[in-house]
Image (cartoon, coloured by chain):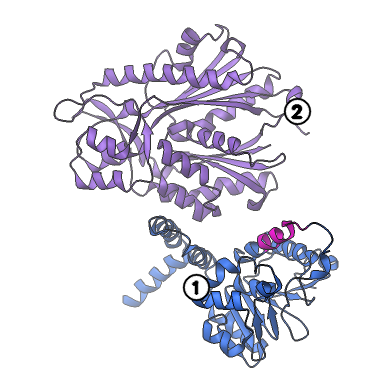
Chain colours: A purple, B blue
Amino acid sequence: MGSPRARILSIGTANPETYYTQADILERFRVKNPIVRSIFSASHIKGRYLFLPTPDADGIPRESQSELLAKHRAGALQLGRQAIARCLESEGLKPEDIDYLCCITSTGLMLPGLTAMFVRHLGFRNSCHRADIVGMGCNAGLNGLNPVSNWAVANPGKNALMVCCEVNSALYIYDDSVGTGVVNSLFGDGCAAVLLRSDDTDESRFAPRVLGFQSHLIPETWRAMSYHWSDEHGKFYFNLDRDVPYVLGTHAETPVAALLERFGLKRRHIRHWIVHSGGMKVIDAIKYTVGVTDHDMRHTVGVLRGYGNLGSGSFLFSYKRLMEEGTVRRGDYGVMMTMGPGSTIETALIRW
Amino acid sequence: MKGSLETQGSLKTLRYTEDGDVATIQLLRERTTMRMVRELTTVCDHLEDVSTCRVVVIRGAEGRFSRGIDFEEFRPDTPMDIHGFNKWEKCCVRIERLPKITIAAMEGAVIGGGMQLALVCDARIATGDLCMQLNEVRLGFLPGMATFRLAKYIGLGRAKRLIMQCPELSAEEALDLGLIDSIAEDLEVAIAETIASFEPIHPVTLELARRLLNESFAVDFENAIGNFLAAQHRSITQTAFLKTLKDHQNTSE
């Protein structure tokens, strides 16, 4: 049917063992600032899986930047190992069967990168082709899916694995400010792995083909989501502007319209929306600009509620829920959408 | 015919015309068949994809609007299924969410599905001979998602009376309840006046206002205010609001 396409054949996800409700976190770190407390309690997030440090007697945890980097490394290995095993298990594959490995993270800088660490520890072949996409933020899952699906198409029958691995708790700084309060109330730890392959023998399988991508950058909001070094804390921290969710929403219409037009489709032809769980404001904004319903956003909202913002892998957690729900039918179209720093909106069209 | 639907020739249950900014859908059949549902859906496709009209008028023919569902298509000796009803509801939602102002211009009988259709329009006007009724429960079935929409218009108590006791409402009674906005002496004149009353038409803002209103009663306040803020952000970044600000600036200088 037309040009060859890669299919998303399976997915596996993983999170840390420990789950914290928003109230747990307020108590653990003895948050006093009433504004920060209200941000946590008014949140659309019920709880999150996190690698949280043990606080000192004053309620403040003391983690140096080097400890945070080590936490990212160890957490990524733990979550990556589980997510990859779960993804490959259903296909009867092992890491040694993977021909291309792409890892995505923005929550810690490693050199050598995640792919090298996974080859070293998880049993991938030394000859496995690799790419690390680092520092692109929450949208990066689709920035990765684009080259991964292209690689799969260029190498029919070969197995390509994409792993989105974020240890957001390795970015935490603790003070009583509203800015850190917003960030610390939002992000969770998690990893998602997806297997892609372009193979005629998969033709009869119920797995969506990746049809195309559309990107959109909003350069004038360059600083709206950004990493900075804090001399005071001796750590990196993440800045999130107040109004950026709505700005992202306003622009979300542009790549969606271009993507659908390219494939001769209308909004009503899209049965499934697989959208990054960035936060409730950006989800609301997308509803009223792209014109999607609460029902379309059910998994995006559900993942936000249960996990928080998981960064690059968030949308894949929604994808997994959609597949488990059992409402997808052969021939259905879906749009994947991720938003992040840049400011960036990435979209992809898939079809089952 | 200018701006006519490409598939006009295949429309049997409807007449679709465009005149300038205004599209008119005329319900030619007294009762709603599955064919009419399909044709309404086709017209919705056209209105969304092709038409530049900003207003859609839905009206009847031969002195009546619509008498609702056509039982000719049902066979009492075959198993019943719900799919046709589902298609009808999907069609109603399409009309309810059209990116156009929708006006139900009614005369005579507005029964059952006809009244359901009127409830999804942005404005409802009728001539003095209106006879409005949701008669479904009396016939042993349900008046579609009027069970969801009607109480928002008129309150739960009145909705219970209309749906469970199935009274026939005169034009005056319908006006009193807020089911119609006005009684027209001359329907053509009233249609023109109703269209004019929406001017200036800011499509995005009107559509957002309608969506928030349709979601009222059904969304809790926490989520509703999030929805409102997102919709308001979109509104105030549109040219209409920026023009309002410029006009204001000019007059105050």
Q: Nearer the viewer, residue B61 or A238?
A: B61
What's under tag 2, amino acid-wise?
Answer: Glu
| Identity of the residue drawn at 63% across and 79% down | B166
The chain letter under disc 1 is B
Label 1 close to label 2 by CB (< 8 Å) = no
The chain letter under disc 2 is A
- Left or right, B174 with respect to B244, comes to right
Q: Nearer the viewer, residue A293 or A159?
A: A293
Confirm whether residue A134 shows in the render: no
Q: Which of the 4 quarters of the picture holds residue B231? A: bottom left
Q: Nearer the viewer, residue A14 or A183?
A: A14
Q: Which residues are magenta?
A: B80-91
- Point out residue A38 in the picture as x, y percentages from the top left corner: 26, 48
Q: Which residue is mark 2?
A: A203
The secondary structure that most of the magenta stretch takes on is helix
| A168 relative to B133, above or below | above
- Point out residue A345 in the picture as x, y percentages from the top left corner: 50, 41
Q: Which mark is residue A238?
A: none
* Tag in front: 1 or 2: 1
Quadrant assignment for the N terminus of chain B: bottom right
Q: Which of the 4 quarters of the picture holds residue B26? A: bottom right
Q: Give the crowd class for mark 1: few <14, some 14-19, many >=20 residues within 10 Å.
A: few
> Helix, strand or loop at disc 2?
loop
Q: Which residue is mark 1?
A: B156
| Identity of the residue drawn at 66% across and 42% down | A333
* C-alpha separation, residue under disc 1 versus residue under disc 2: 53 Å
> Helix, strand or loop at disc 1?
helix
